[in-house]
Image: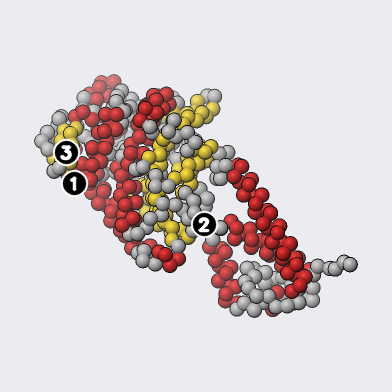
Amino acid sequence: MTFRVPGFALRFVSVLLFMVVVLLAQTGRAEIVEIVGETMGTTYSIKWVTESDADAATPDREVIHKLVDQRLDEILAMMSTYDPESELSRFNTQTSTEWFPVSAETAEVVEAALEVFRVSGGAFDPTVGRLVRMWRFGKDPAADGIPSEEEIESAMKSVGGQHVSVRLDPPAIKKSLPDVELDLSAIAKGYGVDAIVELLGEQEIKNCLVEIGGEVRTSGRKGDQPWRLGVERPSSLNRELQATVDLEDQALATSGNYRNFFEYDGKRYSHTIDPRTGWPVKHHLSSASVVADSCMLADAWATTLMVLGPEEGQRLADQEGITAYLITENESGIERLSTTAGAGSFVEVDPGNLQGNGQESALTVFLITILVFSLALSGLAVGVIFSNRALKGSCGGAEGLKDDEGRSICEMCTTPPEECDQFKQQLKEKVASSSKSYGESDSEASL
């Protein structure tokens, strides 16, 4: 015996398949709230997870936005070199070699900077600001050309972390030479990220991602999975994904040379200045990404590895147990290096592939295909049995379909029209990105 499947049933199954694919794509994705703004001469983006009534006590989005801006302004008032009234600017302009009182936070960041200075053998140096300006970068950069050997040698006399001391109680800093300057732009941005994560925790926001100028820290998870971040493929023109890394309660910072540079007399000069020589670096390391528990340290170590270069940088990172991913670029192409601690942390991807794992993607597609096929068969059976009965539930955009007798599906549906409209609007609003790419940090941020 044969029977004819009603045309209505086939159309219904088509709609069912579409809805299943859309809903499966959203499975496991928690609701994300995002705020954006500007700070430190760059931008920030903050995302956190909300789960219906569980987060009813969380302050609303506008309250959080205001608290974030206030906290970032406090940090700028302490550590900005662009604000003449900040603690750091006043320390730089005064010539006394006596203790200079500062906030506990400024002292904490200076102490961390001097520790990385010591461990790196001077490759990271918070007193390098004068050299950076001479090489046409940073605050009040030189207008044109390049500095002479004599100018570099003269500036080097006041460069060196050994000329700065810090104490935590009572908090204060001092310099051993009158013209020594402090520039915390390679570490304070990361500190700002940490401060905002702490602020969100105080507001009972436990699952969040905070990014300032490309420096990122995560807290908790994104729904039922870690936060997945991307590392850019070095390129001065295009933005492509090189690798992904899954983070939970960790930070990621990337420093690079592939966008911020200038050319003079046919030579290319990087914005990364080696404090040990006074000159821009000349090696082939294009970017260095570091994962750490705090964004402050990830920020400082990413800069350090960019100064050291691929071989020396990888050696020191292995020695200190630093999770890092280094990308070099030369005439033969791109080469990727991972430190011992970073092995397996960064998953390389093809350009444009945001999944970071082809086998995982293939398995996901296979499982979804099986599920959709099973539901399709069930839908056919439902269509045969109930083709002449009223339907219960939301159609999700099937109002244009008709059965074999010319009746609109909406005429047979018992769901109120306003509920259909709400359902369709919810589908449109369910847009989520599985990965965000972070590239060279904004090293010209006006901190």
Residue drawn at x 60%, y 78% as measured from the top left: 416
Q: Which residue is disc 2 drawn over?
A: 29
**Which is more N-terminal, label 3 or label 1?**
1
Marks 3 and 2 sit apart, C-alpha to C-alpha, by 46 Å
Dot label at residue 362? none
Point out the residue furthest to the front here: 1
Amino acid of disc 1: Ser
Name which of mark 2 and mark 1 comes first in the sequence.
2
Q: Which residue is mark 1?
A: 103
Question: Where does residue 77 sit, x and y in percent of width and height?
Answer: 23, 49
Quarter-of-image position of residue 181: top left
User: Element type at marker 3?
Assistant: strand
Please report the residue visible at 33 percent of the width from the left and 55 percent of the height from the top. 201
Graded by Cα atoms within 10 Å as few (under 14), some (14 to 19) or many (20 or more), the crowding at tag 1 reads some
At mark 1, the secondary structure is loop
Front one among 185 and 368: 368
Disc 1/disc 3 C-alpha distance (Å): 11 Å
The three-letter code of the residue at mark 3 reads Arg
Q: Quadrant of residue 124?
A: top left
Q: Which mark is residue 167?
A: 3
Vertical placement of residue 423 versus 17, above or below: below
Q: Position of residue 138 (x, y in %)?
A: 31, 37
Tell me the residue at 10%/35% (across/down). Answer: 98
